[in-house]
Amino acid sequence: MQLTDTFKRVKQASKRLSLLTDEQRNEILLAVSQAIMQQQQRILDANAQDLAKMEKTNPLYDRLQLTESRLEGIAADMRNVASLPSPLGHVTKAKTLPNGLRLCRVSVPFGVIGMIYEARPNVTFDVFSLCFKSGNACVLKGGKDADCSNREEVALIHEVLEQQGISKDVVALLPATHEATGEMLNAVGYIDLCIPRGGRKLIDFVRDTARVPVIETGAGVVHTYFDKEGDLEMGRNIICNAKTRRVSVCNALDTLLVHKDREADIPQLLAPMQGKVTFYYNDESLYDTEFMDYKMNVVTVASLEEALAHIDQHGSGHSESIITMNEQTARIFQSHVDAACVYWNAPTSFTDGAQFGLGAEIGISTQKLGPRGPMALEEITTYKWLIEGEGQVRA
């Protein structure tokens, strides 16, 4: 399979995006949002084809499923992105040198962003909205589980773009094959940045294979530590929300750490989830497991220090939380834990671009070089230096 022609067309289209004003981009995003609502049945029909191929017991089923309410949420997120200020043209640094040269650092698009994702059809719309708003073209590589959904969604986007006189090549969907992934990861000169969004296996493969720049996102082995000074009722609500709101997402709780002085409270902490979640107790074989299912490991620790050591060894750098009424303990936890998002008396379910007021998100970065945490408009721009002079030459 040769996808070079596709990559060339997207690269060329990305250059023309710079000619659009922010108002034009917003109008197109609003038009796509309206089309989602007007033509949601065609998307749901395509999604039903994907769902029919997957067992309902599969942990990815919930992530794959689209509903009217979820499409309404996707359309609302797109309208929200359209309402946000443009991330382009911001002067992030300016200075005048002693020789009179004027330096200005300005935010600009990356160019072409490649996105690799699995059974997540919502990502197709989220990535398009964020990339288009930030002046980036995008190359999408979805998984075979969501291929019918993704193709119908991109077809809808293409229809709106053509109606608005915009090249449909600003967004391309590759075949749902392993070979297409390999070609994207080697598309040097065409793909300016690649973002994998999925499980650890996918992310490791992309990082180890890519010849284009990569930002790692997604995989989350998430902990909540219930301290000896944690409030029981608050803890019940936070833990239940973190685990059961949506079990298939990367910010869902995997391991609950409980201080040994509060071991007797474990049954009450877990009571809201009884009959819904399968609990494991101090199971060392599950310390590194991202369940993406109604399953959770409960581990007792002797101290704050032991909880921190456990997270240090088994956390994935995504989201971690502490439940305590002791501010000093909370500050030590937040200072020590090495993760993109560290919570105090709040559930990890809030790790989300929309919840952070960023519009939608393109992923949750778990690395330290470049963006970290929810990635939205600002995080998918880079910058260039503009230098002005009056004929100065360097000695």
Image: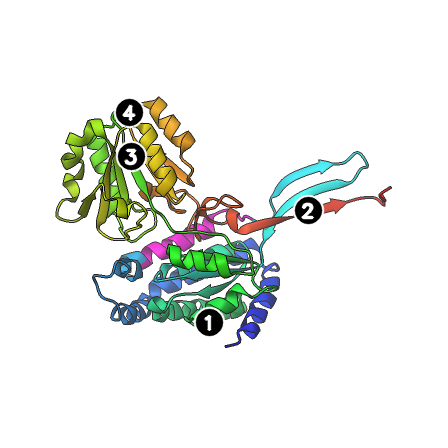
Query: What residue appears at the point 28 percent right and 59 percent down from the top-left corner?
Result: 60
Q: Which is nearer the N-term, disc 1 or disc 2?
A: 1
The region drawn magenta spans: 71-87
Total labels drawn: 4
Magenta stretch, main secondary structure, is helix
> According to the image, label 2 marks what residue?
385
Identify which amino acid the numbered label 3 is placed on: Tyr
Mark 2, Cα crowd under 10 Å, few <14 / some 14-19 / many 20+, is some
Front of the two marks 2 and 4 = 4
Q: Percent from the top left, x then y, of residue 186?
A: 55, 65
Task: Name the one closer to the observer, 295 or 32.
Answer: 295
Front of the two marks 4 and 3 = 3
**Is residue 379 among what the camera can see?**
yes
Callout 1: SS: helix
Q: Percent from the top left, x then y, of residue 156?
A: 41, 69
Q: Percent from the top left, x then y, of residue 48?
A: 27, 69
> According to the image, label 4 marks what residue?
325
Q: Is residue 386 left or right of residue 194?
A: right
Query: What residue appears at the point 64 percent right and 39 percent down from the top-left corner?
Result: 93
Q: Which is nearer the N-term, disc 4 or disc 1?
A: 1
